Image (cartoon, coloured by chain):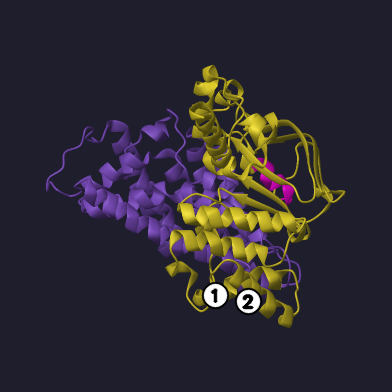
Amino acid sequence: MKFFQGFRFKRALTPIHRLDSRVKLLISCAFFVAFLYVELLPLIVILLAQVPLVVIARVHREWLQTLRGGAFFATMIFVINVLTGSQVTYSLAMVIRFLILISAFSVFFLTTRPDDLEVALEKMGVPYEYCFMFTTAVRYVPVLAIEALTIIDAQRSRGLEMEKGNFIKRVKNFIPVLIPLLVNSIRRSIEMAEAMEARSWGATKYRTSLYVPRLRPMDYISLIITVAAISFAVYVHFFWTIPTTVIPIPGL
Amino acid sequence: MIEVSGLHFTYPTGVEALRGVSTKIGKGEFVAIMGENGAGKTTLAKHFNGLLKPSRGKVFVNGIDTRKASVAELSRKVGLVFQNPDHQFFCETVKEEIAFGLRNFGFPREAIKERVKWALALLGLTKYEKSSPFVLSGGEKKRLALASVLAWDPEVLIIDEPTIGQDYAQKEKLRHFIAQLIAKEKAVIIITHDIEFVADCSPRVIVMSRGRIVMDGPAWTVLTNHKQILKAALIPPQVTQVFIKLSDLGMPTGIIGVNEARDLLVERLLGASG
């Protein structure tokens, strides 16, 4: 539940919140440069590059929650990598890559109003149906989280002990929670589609919006910085030699 | 059986759902918990099988402090049927769905078979035993949810909103069914807004409002106290309203049952003509 808080819009008036959502989407995607690297040093630099964004947007608490929530998956990624014979440094790199991705999108969703995102995607030429689909999906995340808690309560009342048993049993314990959640989501989406059709969704071909997003100087500056940062990362990847082991690991 | 003293509960979001609830529910008792939305009814019920633990105060089930027992241990004694059956079905067949709880509680295989059969028959679901729970109608789903809890024969049965989506015939069946359980010394607690159903059953009624118990007593005293129950956003049953209006003719006001009302009216009319 708390993990989802890190992906929900938090209303505030900071320079980051005021940025155009298309620019913000590009900034978040810029962190994909992490996929160029398997060395620890640049990955750590990329992760730390998010800190100023987070501080300016004043979402540090939620951001830390995202990182903490991701810790479980991060540990799993690390363990699986090590078990399958990867080096410790490499496994750590994979973990940091994962954290970079989830935290970049956490910052994006924390600072972007779902409605702004919808308009922005539309302006980028994405068909309205897809924009609507995407924003609806985002909007339903908290609903699903609450529903999951209710289902867990219902199954615990039938004697299900989620935290009991070995690893495989514990994974199996999720089935009685996931199936009702999935079935209800599908049912809800069908009902929603019917309700939308009953209200003539898609009756007009050309839609107009109340607010038309326009790029401002601050957006252009951010855009230039982002493009520069991406180019720099690509340049470093191809032309610099990066020390491979930054942290001396005992026993290696 | 269940003993609650000075129970306070605050959700992590900061919502104070229960503010000092104390009550006792004994063996073979039939209790209806009523009150407006957000009064704390479901929150209270979730304390009875340990899903929620008190922020302050104590809850005892058979003398065991719920804080010191697991949900599974408590659920074995206190069966809680959730309001929305769609929140619990995941098996391929109706039969499997009923067996799920029994397996979790470690019943032996033979006993599971027998109890599944028994529960299916009890709620009129035998012909669906091999169907998927997802193809059942709304009312059947509600009955399956009930059967899946009843199967392990808990000492206390809590049903959240049992009458929603049920037609009159089903409600009558439910009423008889509850009466059978009471006769077997089980305690039954229903959480409901259906005041006519409560009037028909005439159980002990606990009215909650804003996290507190505001009234507690037999149905015919609670439901006829219209000034008080209006405060908890409830309206007296129709029969009661009629008799309150007839009080200027010297009719009694504490009437909730339709049969009782009919007898009184017939007697009065015959008396007048004779």
Image quarter where the C terminus of chain A lies is bottom right
Q: Is residue B261 above or below residue A2?
A: above
- Residue A216 lies, in percent from the top left, at 27, 32
Q: Chain of mark 1?
A: B
Q: Is residue B5 left or right of residue A217?
A: right
Tell which of A17 and B132 is nearer to you: B132
Residue A166, by quadrant, is bottom right
- Dot 1 and dot 2 residues touching (CB under 8 Å): yes
Q: Secondary structure at mark 2?
A: helix
Disc 2 residue type? Lys
Which residue occupies 62% across, 58% down? B177
Q: Earlier in the sequence, mark 1 or mark 2?
A: 2
Q: Considering the whole magenta stretch, tell me its main secondary structure.
A: helix
Residue span colored magenta: B43-50
Q: Check chain identity for marks 1 and 2: say if they share one.
A: yes
Chain B color in figure: yellow
Chain assigned purple: A
Circle 2 sits on which residue?
B117
The correct choice, above or below, for A2 with respect to B16 in the image is: below
Q: Position of residue A114 (x, y in %)?
A: 36, 42
Q: Which mark is residue A92?
A: none
In this figure, which residue is indicated by the disc labeled 1? B126
Q: Does B227 sit left or right of A247 as displayed?
A: left
Q: Is residue B159 visible?
A: yes
